[in-house]
Image (tube, grey):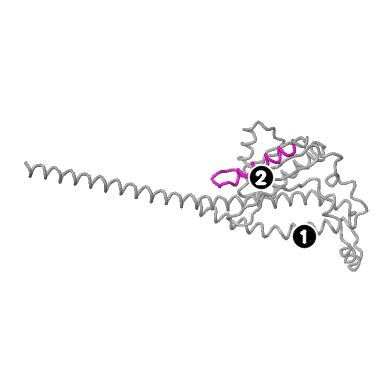
Amino acid sequence: MELVAAAKLRKAQTRIEAMRPYADRMLELMAGTARASASVRGLPLLQQHEQEDRVAIVPLSGDRGLAGAFNSQILRRALALQRELQAEGKQVQWVGVGRRGVGSLRFRRLELAGEFTGFTDEPHYADAQAIAHRVAELYTNDEVDRVTVVYNAFESPLVQRVTVQDILPLSGDLLESSEDEREEDALRGDFIFEPEPEQILERLLPVYLETELYRALLESAASEHGARMTAMRNASKNANELIDSLTLAMNRARQAEITQEILEVVAGADALTGA
């Protein structure tokens, strides 16, 4: 399992490295289109609700265990976030990702607004699209006021950092341009957009949401493989140490038994000789 996890980890790291430039370019494209838009107020995914009393939590767990603290630390952080929100008087809904997370939430009798399983070790873009469609539906239908994702960000095979990220509503700060950027656009000249920038941005926003979720899924997958590789390596090391310890104890017990038998034979021989 350690070798398999190591091979999958290398593949997951390659996918993350290929994904990051695309995500950065997507953000640049959105920002440039937003600067050309007359208004972004009519875009649902950018609308801030008057009150944020209803929050959807999306914990990204794995489909399998034997990965150390990978799943448990996600669930602990998500449940701690739930307690914090409820202490503030807010309602919490759940969208489960991964069999481990879904099973744990159901065991606690928590109602799920959506569940997605069967792909966490090798996610595809279509999986991110399905999750994004569900959370966007919850937000645009005014069922929740905020959507928060909890996942393990990959730093190294030994280190996975639990990350809490608000993905809805999309922050308007992402689309705001600085004075230097506006001057740079002016130097480049005017662009003609077809269709209108607002319509292009309306199409880009859902894609950006899908991209962010896909990035989180890839980070989570790499973290899972790294955690499983480390856990299996530690398990093998502990098993070898246990075997060595038990072998030593067995040898000592056998040597003590042989010594005892020799002493008994010698004592019997002495008794016969004395007789």
Q: Quick check: is 141 in the magenta stretch?
A: no
Looking at the picture, does residue 107 appear above or below residue 71?
above
Please state which amino acid type lies under the numbered disc 2.
Leu
Q: Residue 149 in the image: x percent, y percent? A: 71, 45
- Tell me residue 248's x, y (percent): 34, 50
The image quadrant that residue 80 belongs to is: top right
Which residue is most to the front?
274
Mark number, residue 148? none
The residue at the point 85 percent across, 41 percent down is: 49
Which numbered dot is residue 60? 2
Q: What is the secondary structure assignment of the residue under circle 1?
A: helix
80, 262: nearer the viewer: 262
Image-based side of 221 in relation to 137, left or right: left
Q: Quadrant of residue 95?
A: top right
Residue 78: x %, y % from top left: 68, 41
- Which residue ends up furthest to the right in the rendered image? 38
Name the magenta segment's main secondary structure.
helix
Q: Please provide the residue range marked out in magenta.
A: 61-86
Determine which residue is flagged by label 1: 25
Magenta-colored stretch includes residue 75: yes
Looking at the rendered structure, the secondary structure element under dot 2 is loop
Q: Earlier in the sequence, mark 1 or mark 2?
A: 1
The residue under the point 89% across, 52% down is 198
The three-letter amino acid code for the residue at tag 1 is: Arg
Marks 1 and 2 sit apart, C-alpha to C-alpha, by 25 Å
Label 1, residues with CA under 10 Å away: few <14, some 14-19, many ≥20: few
- In the image, what residue occupies the spot 67% across and 47% down? 151
Residue found farthest to the bottom? 187
Tell me if label 1 and label 2 are in contact, CB under 8 Å: no
- Camera-side residue of 143 and 52: 52
